[in-house]
Image: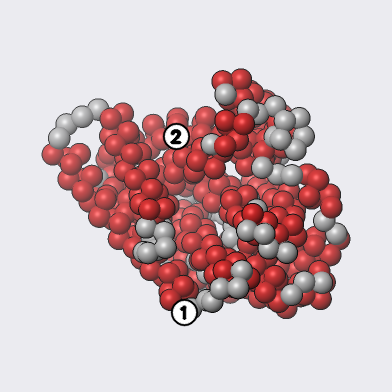
């Protein structure tokens, strides 16, 4: 395990630095390092690390979501309003519709199988979007109109929406029934996640004001509470729907808006924690990519991927139309919706594991989407934000 961690950190840093010097997003270098180290290429990572991969990726995601929450002003989100809400479900819905309309003809699959793949494809990657948008918030790009804040909020809720639909369709494919109550889990999970996070934030603000302790201890407490939120989501699965990741971000937002002096102090500590966590996250995401599956994908799958993206971008444009965002800022919002990785890596193998006939094609679609959209999306965000967004003075 120690050798695997050393390889992840050293090769991840090296690849990220090389790509950065080539004026490409360092994230792509880390993903490439993961693919090379992973079981499908050189197979240099120990099984113990691979077995923990999903948990380690989730820890890294919790760190960046907590950091993002500690920099989000609730007034910015209120000012954005309608687009932030629409981003939670409209782009994903448009992408699912694209697969229902075109995938049966292009890929020779059933309507239900098209829906499963569409739901899998409908999520953007918080692992790529949240760090990128946090960087823009730190540097002041687009923050005057709340653009990165809006995109972070949308990408976090978007995942909840898509995973619920995906789970319902998988159940249907197994011969089960899907009831309206399953789809009610989406607003319930989002609402309860926000309520849980706000309540946790208020309790922590009271606690931190009442009892003196080092900021490092406060960070540890904040992280532990975040882990409890995510664990609670898993414990309540099947009975009550709640989004643990939304709770983490909502807690950070509450602390920022009720105790901004503390939030600004501990944000720096989270930034330092994010340095190793970021390498771990993206290298491990890369390690789950099976290049053989990607190479086995037909041209129609790639064409379908881009058709889905076109529908998604159209849905994103509908979210921001009629707002005070100018044309360039709307284009940036559309670019931010391209990258896929986190959710696809997490649920890509579910259909295969459950023995469904469409399992291989669902997994292949996930791999292809990561290999194509993660680099394009990361590169698009990195190379356009200075041209499309204005910097807060």
> Position of 5 compared to 210: left or right?
right
Above or below residue 376? Residue 24 is: above
Which mark is on residue 2? Answer: none
Residue holding disc 2: 271
Image quadrant assignment for residue 327: bottom right
Question: Element under label 1?
Answer: helix
Distance between the alpha carbons at the discs numbered 1 and 2:
42 Å
Residue drawn at point x = 37 percent, y = 43 percent: 227
Rendered-image quadrant of the N terminus: top right
Compare residues 269 and 300 and report the one nearer the observer. Answer: 300
Residue 361 in picture, x, y percent from top left: 75, 60
Q: Is residue 308 above or below residue 275?
A: below
* Label 2 crowd bin: few (<14), some (14–19), many (20+), radius 10 Å: some
Please state the horizontal and vertical placement of residue 194, each as a whole percent of the image.
Answer: 34, 60
Q: Which mark is residue 180?
A: 1
Q: Nearer the viewer, residue 315 or 232?
A: 232
Q: Mark 1 or mark 2: which comes first in sequence? A: 1
Q: Residue furthest left?
A: 210
Image vertical order of residue 127 relative to residue 23, above or below? below
Residue at image x 13%, y 39%?
A: 210
Q: Nearer the viewer, residue 109 or 376?
A: 109
The answer to whether one can see residue 248 in this image is no
* Of the two numbered discs 1 and 2 in the rendering, the one whose residue sits closer to the viewer: 1
Residue 196 horizontal/vertical position (percent) = 30, 57
């Amino acid at each position: 395990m120690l050798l695997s961690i050393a390889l992840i950190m050293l090769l991840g840093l090296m690849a990220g630095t090389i790509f950065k010097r080539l004026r490409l997003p360092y994230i792509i270098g880390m993903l490439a390092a993961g693919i090379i180290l992973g079981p499908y290429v050189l197979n240099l990572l120990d099984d113990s690390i691979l077995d923990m991969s999903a948990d380690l990726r989730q820890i890294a995601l919790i760190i960046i979501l907590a950091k993002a929450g500690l920099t989000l002003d609730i007034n910015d989100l209120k000012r954005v309003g309608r687009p932030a809400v629409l981003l939670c479900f409209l782009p994903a819905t448009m992408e699912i519709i694209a697969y229902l309309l075109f995938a049966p003809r292009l890929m020779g699959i059933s309507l239900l199988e098209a829906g499963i793949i569409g739901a899998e494809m409908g999520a953007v990657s918080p692992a790529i979007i949240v760090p990128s948008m946090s960087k823009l918030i730190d540097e002041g790009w687009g923050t005057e109109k709340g653009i990165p804040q809006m995109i972070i909020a949308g990408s976090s809720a978007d995942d909840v929406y898509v995973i619920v639909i995906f789970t319902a369709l998988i159940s249907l494919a197994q011969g089960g029934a899907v009831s309206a109550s399953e789809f009610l889990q989406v607003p319930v999970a989002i609402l309860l996640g926000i309520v849980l996070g706000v309540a946790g934030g208020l309790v922590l603000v009271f606690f931190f004001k009442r009892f003196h302790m080092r900021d490092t201890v406060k960070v540890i407490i904040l992280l532990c509470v975040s882990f409890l939120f995510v664990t609670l989501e898993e414990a309540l699965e099947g009975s009550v729907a709640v989004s643990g990741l939304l709770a983490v971000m909502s807690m950070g937002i509450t602390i920022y808006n009720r105790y901004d002096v503390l939030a600004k102090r501990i944000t720096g500590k989270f930034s330092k924690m994010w340095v190793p966590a970021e390498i771990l996250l993206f290298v491990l995401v890369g390690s789950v990519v099976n290049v053989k599956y990607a190479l086995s994908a037909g041209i129609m799958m790639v064409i379908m991927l881009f058709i889905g993206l076109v529908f998604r971008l159209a849905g994103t444009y509908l979210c921001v139309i009629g707002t005070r965002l100018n044309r360039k800022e709307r284009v940036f919002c559309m670019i931010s919706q391209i990258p896929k990785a986190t959710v696809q890596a997490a649920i890509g193998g579910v259909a295969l594991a459950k023995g469904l006939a469409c399992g291989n094609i669902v997994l292949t679609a996930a791999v292809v989407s990561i290999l194509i959209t993660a680099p394009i999306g990361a590169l698009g965000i990195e190379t356009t934000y200075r041209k499309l967004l204005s910097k807060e003075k």
